[in-house]
Amino acid sequence: MSKLPAATVNDITRAKQQYVLGFGLSLVTTLTAYLLVVHQVFEGWNLAYAIVGLALAQVIIQLLCFLHVGHEREPRWNLLLLDFTLIVVVIVVIGTLWIMNHLNYHMSPQDTNNYLVKDEGFQSR
């Protein structure tokens, strides 16, 4: 049996450390988001902003620690794939939020009347 070269052993050790660090940071961000919701630290939009911020931190952790973005020899192709993925995610998230926001308007005739009178200032005849 031949032993692995020292450079390979160092690379394996560094990769393991990076995976353990990424796993730990992922757990911290996930548990932080959970605890913010359970203990009602923030309310309304402040809670949403905190969760979105933690989600973005989680994405960065995943990209750096597990997908090794930026460590490859030719990062151009990975950057193009990442850009396309981000565009699709942004379209899906914005579309979902837009649809959910407008579902309130189209719920039922009584809800629509209440919405028009209360929020739009429109009185039906």
Image (cartoon, rainbow, N blue to C red):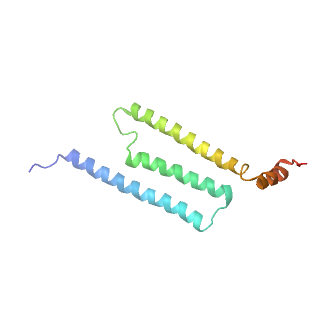
Image quarter of residue 50: bottom right
Question: Which residue occupies the foreground of this view, 22 or 39?
Answer: 39
Residue at x 58% of width, y 45% of height: 93
Image quarter of residue 22: bottom left
Question: Which residue occupies the foreground of this view, 58 or 21?
Answer: 58
Q: Is residue 84 left or right of residue 13?
A: right
Question: Which residue occupies the foreground of this view, 86 or 97?
Answer: 97
Q: Residue lying furthest left in this view?
A: 1
Residue 81, percent across and down?
A: 43, 35
Residue at x 62% of width, y 53% of height: 49
Q: Residue lying furthest right in this view?
A: 125
Q: Is residue 6 left or right of residue 87?
A: left
Residue 104, percent across and down?
A: 71, 52
Q: Is residue 99 left or right of residue 80?
A: right
Residue 1, percent across and down?
A: 8, 51
Residue at x 62% of width, y 55% of height: 48
Image quarter of residue 69: top left
